[in-house]
Amino acid sequence: MTDRQRKPQNDRQGDLQDDSTGRLYGVGLGPGDPSLVTVRAAELIGKADVVAYHSARHGRSIARSIAERYLTGGQIEEKLVYPITVETTDHPGGYRGALDDFYEEAAARLAAHLDAGRDVVVLAEGDPLFYGSYQHMHKRLAHRYPTEVVPGVTSVSAAAARLGQPLTEAEETLTVIPGTLPEEELAARIAAADSAVIMKLGRTFPAVRRALERAGRLEDAQYVERAFMEGERIAPLAEIDGETVPYFSVAVLPSKVAPLEPVVRTVDGTGSVTVVGTGPAGPLWLTPEARGALAEATDLVGYTTYLARVPERPGQVRHGSDNKVESERAEFALDLARRGRRVCVVSSGDPGVFAMATAVLEVACEEAYRDVPVRVLPGMTAAHAAASRAGAPLGHDYAVVSLSDRLKPWDAVARRLRAAAEADLVLALYNPGSRSRTTQVGLARDLLLEYRAPQTPVVMARDVGGPTERVRIVRLGELDPALVDMRTILLIGSSQTQAVERGAGVEVVWTPRRYPE
């Protein structure tokens, strides 16, 4: 009852093997219903000399129960019984050591059959290479014997089918998350996901539920237990008692694209404003928390250039405006929130650094808006992004000053520059110039040269993270105001800041953490 005469379609090693050896098959059985086993899987199970399957110490195997109708009764059955199921063991290598020894022993048992010319089918619930036990056999045997892996319907697809809701649509991405991750990591992954499936619940359920709540996604989460199996249960995850959750269950955050027939959801009518920092450029600079808030918002409010960095989502309303109407923009966002909308005010960099957080909070502290929930989510600052490109110029004490005199007089700017220079602080200079402000960089340079040597390193960083990024290292005495615009940030070194050429003409800037006595 062998199948050696027909080469497997995806057999990478078959032509190089001795025909006297058997073939290894990793066979996916799907989520539980035997009728969802593929034709290829059923064919191989029926023809196999040896059928192997994993089980806990109680001896019952879900994989075998799914495949039972396809067994002939004449095959050798290899029951691969896990020595432990929880992470407590006397094994000198701990839990991982005990499992590694088990996998080595199990692989040796299967290799003995393969060496004897017997074809071996290893059964796997779902798909063999998706969190499946088979993969441990595959890694130990596939390079030694002709091997074929037969895919199966995963629990992810089964859960979506039972829910009757799309997992992903349009440009959405799907994230598969093991519930065994630390709770904070779970919350971060969930917050950043468009749609997600969280596997391996069971004893991890309480942490998963808390992570969903922390990420603001508990309301969206659905629970699917034993999809396509006896005892199947489907419900909103928030309604599930954690004491009743088995390992064979998943949490699903379906597609956010609105269905044709809107799903009626219970809401309390309370809106909110979240001020989100998007970092200095595009999506790579977004924190998971910021990404999640942007995805959950009903409305986005912001300067049109910054809104353009945020991916468009069906059903989400975008309200763009000019960069000079910050108070009006804040008031508009708060008015939307009073009408029950979830509003994100989009800010570049960090919203609390010369950006929209102050404008929103200033208006939010007026009597009319004091009941509107407002939170601020941090972002990567332009100063930190620029510093990373140059080395570590902010490695010691530093001051951050805006050169713009649109909201404060130049005399105030000059006093602060002078104080920072006298204190020998590294300086991060924001808003150095624009079409209407062309003198500030030259004035700042001349003032600082009263306290700093002309050879003081200066990092000129423009559009960091963007398509026209350019980072140059010049000397303070050579700083040319004509090369500086509103998209440039300047990092001026202290008396201790070093600029060192390291190799291939690459110069790095760093400020020592130890200051001379």
Image (cartoon, rainbow, N blue to C red):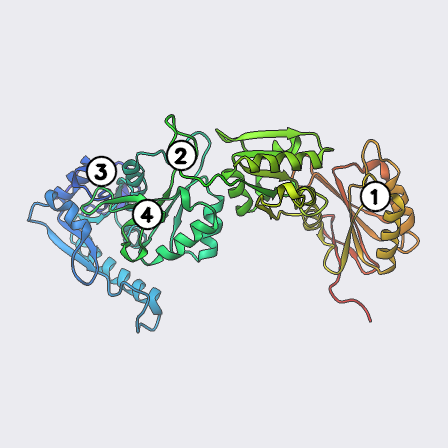
Looking at the image, the residue that sits furthest to the top is 260
Q: In the image, is residue 503 above or below residue 318?
A: below
- Look at discs 2 and 1 and give the one toward the viewer: 1
Q: Amino acid at mark 2?
A: Thr
Image mark for residue 408: 1
Q: Amino acid at mark 3?
A: Lys
Question: In the rendered view, does 379 fall on the left or right side of 33?
Answer: right
- Look at discs 1 and 3 and give the one toward the viewer: 1
Image mark for residue 250: 4
Q: CA distance from mark 1 to mark 4?
A: 55 Å
**The residue tagged with tag 1: helix, strand or loop?**
loop
**The residue tagged with tag 3: helix, strand or loop?**
loop
- Look at discs 1 and 4 and give the one toward the viewer: 1
Whichever of labels 3 and 2 marks the residue nearer the N terminus, that label is 3
Whichever of labels 1 and 4 marks the residue nearer the N terminus, that label is 4
- Point 30% across, 74% down: residue: 90
CB atoms of marks 3 and 2 within 8 Å: no
Image mark for residue 15: none
Whichever of labels 4 and 3 marks the residue nearer the N terminus, that label is 3
Q: Amino acid at mark 4?
A: Val
Looking at the image, the residue that sits furthest to the front is 367
Label 2, residues with CA under 10 Å away: few <14, some 14-19, many ≥20: some
